[in-house]
Amino acid sequence: MVDERRLVRLLQRVASELAYLQARAGEDRAALQADAERLSGLKYRFVTTIEGVVNVAQHLCASEGWGPPKDNGDAVRLVGAHGVLDEQLARRLVGAVGFRNLLVHQYAEIDDARTVAFLDRIGDIQDFVSQVSTWLDEHAG
């Protein structure tokens, strides 16, 4: 059974990190991309925000017996497959997990323009928080 208090804390952390990204989304994109310090902060916040999504997904998979997932992207996919998320949203978030992996593990050089453009996809993270919260309200003890 899901630990409601833990899940709420995890969702609050994602929402807090998301607020930073939402503020950056309204800024001048060229200036953001040109500022190495702010761009570095943006990358870090993408990592921590998406890691928060993964933490929620892993918690749900473990507590609900939906796993074990093969990897972090699979955890998000499983949450979608079990109706917590819209499956299209889950697929997009699996892509976000891949983006996080690129940032963390540096499998390939990431174009700074791609990082800044990823701000256009943060609505998926807001939808994630909303859909998981709705599921939790419906399944709370």
Image: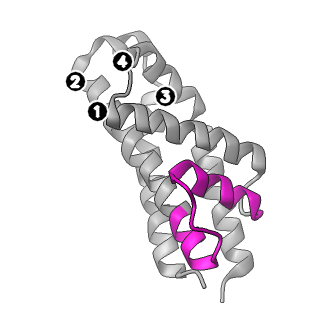
Mark 1 and mark 2 in contact (Cβ < 8 Å)?
yes
The residue located at (52%, 27%) in the rendering is 118
Q: Residues within 10 Å of mark 1 (few under 14, many from 20)?
A: few
Q: How far is disc 1 from disc 4 in space, using C-alphas?
A: 17 Å
The residue located at (56%, 61%) in the rendering is 57
* Image location of residue 97, percent across then percent down: 51, 42
Q: What residue would you read off at disc 4?
A: 109
Three-letter code, disc 3: Ala
Q: Is residue 9 above or below residue 130?
A: below
Q: What residue would you read off at disc 2?
A: 37
The residue located at (28%, 33%) in the rendering is 41
Q: What residue would you read off at disc 1?
A: 41
Q: Sequence-wise, which precedes: disc 2 or disc 4?
A: 2
Q: Indicate which label's residue lies in the foreground, 1 or 4.
A: 4
Q: What residue would you read off at disc 3?
A: 25
Q: Sequence-wise, which precedes: disc 4 or disc 3?
A: 3
Mark 3 and mark 1 in contact (Cβ < 8 Å)?
no
Magenta stretch, main secondary structure, is helix
Three-letter code, disc 1: Gly
- Is residue 67 rendered magenta in the image? yes
* Image location of residue 48, percent across then percent down: 37, 47
Q: Sequence-wise, which precedes: disc 1 or disc 4?
A: 1
26 or 127: nearer the eye?
Answer: 127
What are the residue bounds of the magenta stretch? Answer: 58-83
